[in-house]
């Protein structure tokens, strides 16, 4: 499952930006319905995008995006929260 989570987390920005083909989008949505950790990462990414939009920026800088991805991956994939 962690391998699939890694794939999903790498695609979250494209998913949040609504820039992926329908088939890939359906794959991500199916995974998000089944995986609480990835759903939490999605919620975080959506909040970041909303915050940035409120600040008047069009897109999160690539460097920030990469750092956030690494942080989310470390927290949610490498060390999933205990339930």
Image (cartoon, rainbow, N blue to C red):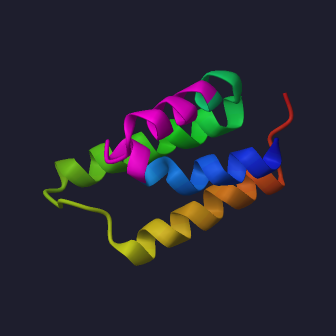
Q: Which residues are magenta?
A: 14-30
* Residue in view at x 29 percent, y 43 percent: 50
Left or right: residue 52 compared with residue 57: right
* Residue in view at x 73 percent, y 54 percent: 75
Q: Position of residue 19 (x, y in %)?
A: 32, 48
**Magenta segment includes 15:** yes
Q: Is residue 76 visible?
A: no
Q: Position of residue 11 (x, y in %)?
A: 51, 52
8 shown above or below 43? below
Quarter that holds the N terminus: top right
Q: Residue furthest bottom?
A: 63
Name which quarter of the figure residue 60 lies in.
bottom left
Left or right: residue 40 compared with residue 49: right
42 shown above or below 67? above
Quarter that holds the C terminus: top right
Dominant secondary-structure state across the stretch colored magenta: helix
14 shown above or below 18? below
Q: Residue furthest left?
A: 56
Q: Position of residue 46 (x, y in %)?
A: 40, 41
Q: Nearer the viewer, residue 12 or 61?
A: 12
Q: Position of residue 41 (x, y in %)?
A: 58, 43
* Residue in view at x 73 percent, y 60 percent: 74
Q: Is residue 60 visible?
A: yes
**Magenta segment includes 63:** no
Q: Residue furthest top?
A: 33
Q: Nearer the viewer, residue 23 or 78?
A: 23
Left or right: residue 12 compared with residue 22: right
Left or right: residue 5 compared with residue 53: right
Q: Nearer the viewer, residue 75 or 19?
A: 19
């Amino acid at each position: 499952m962690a391998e699939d989570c890694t794939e999903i987390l790498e695609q979250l920005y494209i998913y949040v930006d609504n820039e992926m083909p329908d088939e890939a989008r359906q794959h991500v949505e199916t995974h998000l319905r089944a995986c609480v950790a990835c759903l939490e990462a999605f919620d975080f990414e959506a909040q970041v995008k909303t915050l940035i939009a409120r600040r008047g920026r069009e897109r999160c800088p690539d460097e920030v995006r990469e750092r956030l991805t690494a942080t989310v991956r470390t927290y949610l994939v490498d060390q999933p929260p205990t339930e």
